[in-house]
Amino acid sequence: MQVDVADLEDIALGATILGTGGGGDPHVGKLVAKQAIEECGPVEMIRPEELDDDDLVLVSAQMGAPTVAVEKLPAGHEPMASVERVERELGREADATMPMECGGINSMFPFAVAARKDIPLVNADGMGRAFPELQHETFNVYGVSGTPAALADEHGDTCLLETTDNERLEWHARGLTIRMGGVAYVTDYPMSGTEVQDTAIPGTMSLARDIGTAVRTTDLGPVDAISEATEGSIYGEPTQLFEGKIVDVRRRTEEGFVVGDVVIDGLGADAGETMEIEFQNENLGARRNGEWVATVPDLITVTDRETGEPIRTEALRYGARVSVIGIPTPEIMRTDAALDVWGPRTFGLETDFVPLADS
Amino acid sequence: MNGHRLGIDVGGTNTDAVILDESDDPIAKTKTPTTEDISSGILNALDEVLRQAEISGDDLEYVMLGTTHATNAIAERKGLNDVGVLRLGAPATKSIRPLLEWPDDLAAAIGDDIAILDGGHEFDGRELNAIDDEEIREQVRAFDHVDAFAVTSVFSPVREDHEERVAEIVHEELGDDVPVSLSHEIGSVGLLERENATALNAALTSVAAEAANAFIDAMDERSIDAQLYFGQNDGTLMSVEYALEYPIFTVASGPSNSVRGAAYLSGVENGIIVDVGGTTTDVGALTDGFPRESSVAVEIGEVKTNFRMPDLIALGVGGGSHVDIGSDGTVTVGPESVGYRLTEEARCFGGSTLTATDVEVAASGIDIGDTRPTVEDETVRKAREYIRTEVERAVDRMKTSPDPVPVVVVGGGSILVPSDLDGASEVYKPDHYEVANAVGVAIAQVSGEVDRIYSLDDQERDTAMDDAKAEAKSRAVEAGADADTVEVFDVQEVPLSYLPGNAVRIKVKAAGQLDH
């Protein structure tokens, strides 16, 4: 499957929906990927099964503060530089690249790496949505070491990390990111083809594209459009959790994250009911009349009721008419081991995981 | 007799004027067609209001102009400067060139002369890269054919010195008269959007000079020796000299003026303003007497910018909107409109197009046009319902809480809006509603601004904030405001580090009434 410039628009839109309110605006990443494909040609996207067992797969992603990311734009070589630093350490070149996060801006940079290095991009990722930290990866959940990992900045500085566990990788990488000016580019979790097949969430990039295409072209509501796209994927069938009007948004900043909740009064079939959604950059959990109806890791996305456009948490505002859409995640993201890494309690929600039914 | 003020609003269709007496009460008003050369339209309006008020030009103490000239120049790509667009940030930022996402014809209209040079800062004020004077000089000389420069440095809202150095070099190389727009004066964090706004500003300086000169010439023609001001986006006034340097700050002055005028005429300080024109209706919010500003990126001429603009919802409904009856009996209003041809094409003026105005004339018998057209009751009911629903939804979206709020309706098409809107505690249609724009600029306040970095190592945040507020107030007084009326109306705080206790950038705006 080939990915060309035109496909990037749909992937970016789908990635915003998979970003569940966070993950960073894909806009800047899209422009970088576009330029790479225009200069080097379209990207070959392959299924995890197409990898050889001992192929080397290296991911790339941006980490840091979204406010810095929109001001200090990349030089362009950073994602390549972090990949190449890990290649140097391992003494071999990557056979393929892959996103570590299919939601938000990090859906985009791996396309620039694939185009410029002329290697295929694996249609899979390690988050299945957007999450805030480096340990939030199925690769981590299922036992892959995050290191050797490398960070790169616009000056051409790189830094190689070896850590004893993946939480410490996050801790050191976050500190270096501040020194690199608030945004850095990371390559971590170097994997063999077998490891990707065993631990990655397959099909998430084509899912992003299909969701984007469906929402862009649909005459139906966003739920029906997304249903069309998830049908052929390992994700469950989306449901409209709620329909209504935003009546309150509370936000505060905690350790670099935007934390808060939004209150929605029901309209239509939901008239007279209330939904509250808690978020930390991404939407974490939704309560209907006080009862939890959906939580991480399942996807909770707020969309414009009329256009189906996803609304990021920083753009939530009073008066907007919205549909709240829930998408059940695949089993690989819901195991006990996975919930230990990204279940509701790890984000401070007072509930166990409330799985969305695959209706 | 002295102390009168004249407010003029030059719109795309009409030039409105109003004269306020010493106690700021409207004593004369007119709507005249806008002319190609602007100044003869201003003279027509001026002569008419002076005649009505029975005063002479000498009685005018202040003259204020609101104009959409800059907005139209961008929309029509007319009269724009060739701009040298310089970005300082290399090696960062090179992956996305300036003007990348502009419409091709707009980028071509300003010449597409772009360069990315060494420089810029980090979020905490450290240098990202040093600037190279020789590199800048060479680039400036290579762009010696442009009319103006736009300079944008990475994190200049935190540290502006690199941009200021480029301005010095441009003036050394090409002379002091070359306009240089610096991004830190224009926008906030968000490089592409700030760069876009800065490039648009640089593109507009000739157009701004033309409008200013038309205004000055018109006043000279009638030997009027009043102080002249322009209305700006935030609803306050700026001097002619300032308007020449920052024309981009006039692009949204129209809606701001009508919000301010509506507030003044109705006495409402907090509520929703509905301004009904010929083609569109703008719905805005009034917070403590000022327009509420938008928190998301605003597009001008299809270009994303990030400076703050009044938060508005524009509806495709106005007095000249077509009323269409579908084959299934549904009735829609707009977005197509007869616009300024209302007096030829609307049925109540003998034309053949059924407009929103015709529906009201038919239903209420209000005295507009030459005849009272016949419109079926069912169509009237459905058209009114359509407009009511559109306006009510927009009002609701602009509210910040579910409680009912006052709604003020102004503009030439005010009759379209019913007096019992859902979500409104009361609907006001004040006297002189049709010239609320011109009233808004005439009563506008004069402002003072402080934008400074405070170190919090040697003082408390509150002390720094108090200092900035006091300074902004005293600048407003220096600019002509009556000290008793000056109040702070905007405070922004940008922390310069993730670590607590270092430095903070504080921006404060204060405004007060002009002294009489």
Image (cartoon, grey):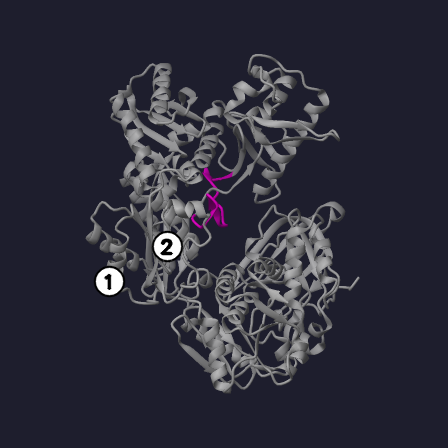
Assess disc 2: are there few (<14), some (14-19) or many (≥20) residues with their C-alpha within 10 Å of its C-alpha.
many
| Residue at the extreme top of the image, as rendered | B370
Please indicate whether residue A108 sits to the left or right of residue A359 in the image: left
Q: Which residue is mark 1?
A: B133
Per the image, the residue denoted by label 2 is B506
Give me the chain letter of mark 1: B
Q: Nearer the viewer, residue B254 or B73?
A: B73
Q: Is residue B446 above or below residue A206?
A: above
The stretch of residues the image draws in magenta is B285-307
Q: Is residue B443 visible?
A: no
Residue B353 coordinates in the image, percent (x, y): 61, 22
Q: Earlier in the sequence, mark 2 or mark 1?
A: 1
Q: Position of residue A97 (x, y in %)?
A: 56, 75
- Amino acid at pointer 2: Ile
- Residue B100 placement: quadrant: bottom left
- Cα–Cα span, label 2 and label 1: 30 Å
Residue type for callout 1: Asp
